Structures are given as structure tokens and as C-alpha cells.
Image (tube, rainbow, N blue to C red):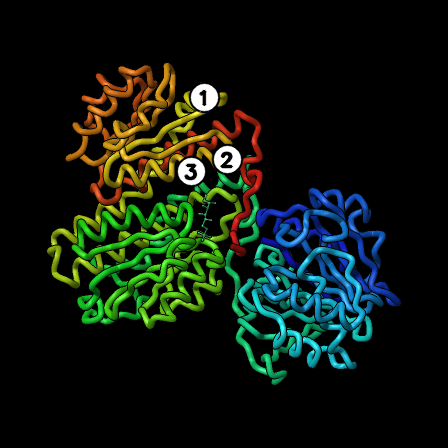
Amino acid sequence: MCGIVGYIGDSQAAPILLDGLSKLEYRGYDSAGIAVYDGEHIQTQKSIGRLKVLSELTHDGATMPGTVGIGHTRWATHGAPSKENAHPHFNQDETIAVVHNGIIENYLKMKKYLEKKDYHFVSDTDTEVVAHLLDYYYKGDPIEAITKVMHRVEGSYALGIIFLEHPGVVYAVRKDSPLIVGHGKDGNLIASDVPAVLKYTRNVYFIQNEEIAVLTGESIAFYNVDGEEIQKESTTIDWDINAAEKAGYEHFMLKEMYEQPKTVRDTLNPRIKDGAVVIEELGMTDEEIRRIQRIHIVACGSAYHTGVTAKYVFEGMARIPVEVDLASEFRYRNPILQENDLVIIISQSGETADSLAALREAKSKGIKTLGIVNVVGSSIAREADTVMYTWAGPEIAVATTKAYSAQLIAEYLLAVKFAQVRGEITETEVASYLKDLQKLPQQIEMLLSNKERIQHFANRYISAKDVFFVGRGIDYAISMEGSLKLKEISYIHSEAYAAGELKHGTISLIEEGTLVAAVLTQEELYKKTISNIVELTSRGAFVLAVTTTGNTEIEKAADYVIYIPQTNRWFTNSLAIIPLQLFSYYVSVGKGCDVDKPRNLAKSVTVE
Ligand code: AGP
């Protein structure tokens, strides 16, 4: 996923562009570039690798004077990482500069069309097509050219554009890729995400699909795809700037793990009023809730893992059948959806291409959709019929932790609400559930304070080659997330397995000293999982058990035990995941991996 920044105002643009791009590094990238109008030409400088290379090349922007510019960090999709493929891209006479996030799906067809009209390309990117197409349509009116391009290209795009003949203006337009406008005191900005502009302004406009923003140093105007001016409301961002910085922690991931108590409180408390679950944004009457016949939970990665937990909770508490799907599967399997189904899309970024496509698939079949999303104003948040925000604030580390915990809370609240409305639980049970939920933050705090013991244990496994995570029921869902955390930030191969499934093949992989993390938080399944642990240790495995205080029987079977506090059986994921997050974090740190920006990964996968 790429990062876009643009600036126009009284200050030198290049340093602002470089600073803004540095706040977007978390999105993952492999090259970068900026373009600045220097009073005569549009100057550009590009580099591959980290942003500091570009800063060094431009002496932190000093070699590129000018007060109007656009910048970009590129995550390669079409064309390998290279200076030629880095943005900004230009038309042939370098009078139009473009930065782009997204994918132009018909770029090859457009490229052939333009080559027949004697346009020459210098890169392998889809973005360069946009630069030449703007040139092709530009007859002196940038908005006219932009709207014509919007009618010709297919796919997703967030574009920042400057025209040499209109040097006092930055243009921005989006379709399915996020883009915001910041109204600052000494200039105006565009960016892919809020952290890039927070240093300059909190007054932000979220550009919606097929809207065009026209920025001068003093003004911001918006137009629709027909070139008609439209009015938009701004939003005041109340994140403090530290919320998007590390706040003294070594890594964003550690900071965000320690923000989980707050994240849980912020997601939970506004939705508990006078001892009842109140989800105002749900937009569903009690009658509609009673009519739900099946819930489809659709997501990717860790968000999917929360969905697996939610299946157990919804079915166990509210007795509603639940199907959980990987979004990349759901969108292509022509899912069987019926009138009274509810499709829940879970996504931290709200921009994951597969999850957005799954949402659209459900909507195309007329099914009610609910988004559980963290990023305000994101595509999934806007396109779902209703959205339940997880108030986790900006999550910068690629490996999700606080958003994951917030997603679980949102799912628990929905399950309690649905169960209560459908008469599956009593008022007494509601009160008990809410009491347990409201204890989670301090229980998480207690587990986080236990980090030294886990760090010490993790250091023994930084050279592990294979690690297994096993559990039954919700413990299996917890194992999935524990395994992904270890894989994605320490690059150690790992698998999550239903404990009862080991004997059907995987146990053949167990050798002397193989680490197996066994999760046991479901009391009615303890004994079954303990017998699996005995099978594992008898074949040489070293078993780390994560279990609930009081289950001391485990001491006889496991080699190392981490206890979590007692809570309701439906909510144990919120606690058991904490030591597994810490374990993965310290293994990754011990291996010297790039914890916040693991190799090959991006924070939000906005392309297929
Ligand atoms: C989680 O640690 C991963 N970074 C990844 O699996 C992530 O959960 C997945 O890509 C879904 O992202 P989303 O929640 O933004 O849709």
C-alpha cells in the first residue's frame, strides 16, 4: 500500500513532504519520490529503499526549493522497485506530475491506446498511464482532464496531481483508495492517512469516492465526477500527535500492546449504558435482530481469527448459526446468502481489498452488512450498511495487537446484545457478562506487567525453526492468532492446530525439543487438551501452556505454564493472547527483526 503526501502554502514544500512520508512509513514501501514546482519547472527526485535515502539525496529537501509539491512512498504492484517505477510519474513534456495509490486495472488497455497515439512510456507502472492520459485530455482545464480520466480508468486510485500551467494548485482525487485533505494555518495538504498531516493540522476532510479536491495555499474546493462543485464537512482529529508516534516505547508494536487496556475500555465503555449494551450505530431494530437467521463473518488475517472466536461466542451465547470466511475465498465462491442473513466484515484498516470486495459481494446480493472497522472514514466503514468502530486509534505496527483486542470486544458486545434481544440470556447473565468485560482492561494490564518472565522464556527460542500452537474450541482460535504473530514478526515457521487433530498427521513432526504452545482456557476441554499435551511431551515436545489460574493440574503435564486471570469462558481470548503477543514480540526483538515493519508485509493489503 503506498503513501501519498501533497502540500501547497507559504512554507518550503519538500521538507513537509519528506516529514509527511515518514509518518506513512508504516504502510510499507520499497521506493519513494517527491516533485516540487520551483517557479519554472516541476523538479523531481526519486530513490529506492528507505525514505532516508531520498532525504539524503535532497539534503532534507533543501535542494528542491518551492512551496507546492507532491510526494510518494511506493509498495510495488506493477513493475519492480526501481527509480524508473518510483512515483511521481510525468507526462512526456513533464508538465503534469502524478502520485498514485491503488491499481489501475485496465492500464494495459489504456497503455496500448496511448502508444497508438505516439505516447512513450519510461516505466512499467500502471500510474504512468494516468500521467499520459491526463496529458491526452488536458486542454487547459485540469478538472475537465481529471474527470475525463476518471471516466476512462477502472480500478482503485488515490491521486495527487500538479499541473505546470496551474502551479498554485494541488489536485487530489480518489476511488477506493484512502485520501484526506488537511486544512492548515499556513497551507493545505493531502495525504493517504491522518498521521502525515497531524503535525500541521487537525482539521481534516475525508475525500469520498469519485470526489476531486482542489487545493490552493488559502482555499480548498471539492467537485464531483461531473465537475460540479460540492460542499463537504471537515472532521477534527482528536488523536494527540503522540498517538501516532512511539511515545517512548522501542517499537510501535510494544506501545500498541500496552495500549490494549485503553483500547478495550474505549471500545467497550461507550456501549454499556445503565447495565445494558447500547450499540447506537448498529442501525438494527430488535425485530431485525430477532429475524437474523445466519451470520457470515468475513475478514483476513488476524481479523479473521477474531471472527473464528466470534463464531463460538455468537453460537454459544446467542444460538445464531455463524459461518466464518476468509475474504479472499468468500468473494469468489458465490456464497449462499439468504434474505435474513447478516454479513459482518471485520477490518482494522477498512481498506483491505479482499474484505472490501467481500462487502460488495454481500451488498450486491442485497444482504445487510455491518463493518467492524478501526479507521474512521475508510472504504469499508463507508460502504457497509452500518459500521461499529473499534476505537483503537492509529495502529502503526504491521502486526496488529490493539485493534485485534478491540475487534474481540466489538464482537462480544454484539453477541451479548443479540443474545439478550433474542431471549437467549437472562438479565442476570447480561450483568455477569458485562461485569467480566469491564474487568478485562485491568486483567490485561496485569498480564502485560508480567513481561519479564515471558521475555526470559522467549530468549530461549529465538533460534527455533518450528513452533506449534494447539487448542480446542476458542483456544484453537487463540492458537491461530498466536501462530500468526510469531510467523509475521520473527519469520519462524509456525502452525496452529486443533489439539484433537494432531494425531491425524501433524504429530509426526514433533521431535525432541520442539516447542508447542498449548492454550487451555475452556474448562470443559481441559482434560482433553491435557491428554494431547501428554502425547506431545512423550514424543519429546517442550510444552508451554497458557491456562487459567486454578488449573494447576497442568503443572504435571506441561513444561512451562503461564497463567491468565479467571474470566468468562467466552472472553478468554482477550487475555490468553497477551502472553502470546509478548512471546512473539520478544522472539522477534531477540532475532533482531524489524518488528514494526516485517519483511514482505504491508499494514493494509489494499491490492489483491
Ligand atoms: C495482522 O497482524 C496482520 N498484519 C494481517 O493479518 C491483518 O490482520 C490482515 O491483513 C487484515 O487487515 P485489516 O484488519 O486491516 O483488514
Q: Does residue 188 appear to the left or right of 511 in the view shown?
A: right
The residue that mark 2 highlights is 489
Name above or below for residue 204 compared with residue 430. below
Q: Position of residue 394 (x, y in %)?
A: 50, 52
Residue at x-position 58% and y-position 53%: 1
Quick one: SS at disc 3? Answer: helix
Q: Residues within 10 Å of mark 1 (few under 14, many from 20)?
A: many
Q: Say if disc 1 is inside 8 Å of ligand 1.
A: no
C-beta proximity under 8 Å, tags 2 and 3? no
**Residue lying at the far right of the rendered structure:** 40
Label 2, secondary structure: give it. Answer: helix
Q: Is mark 3 within 8 Å of ligand 1?
A: yes
Residue 461 is tagged as 1
- Cα separation between marks 2 and 3: 9 Å
Q: Give the mark nearer the N terminus: 1 vs 3.
A: 1
Image spot of residue 426 (x, y percent): 11, 56
Residue 101 vs residue 11: left or right?
left
The amino acid at mark 3 is: Leu
Residue 255 visible in the snapshot: yes
The image's mark for residue 484 is 3
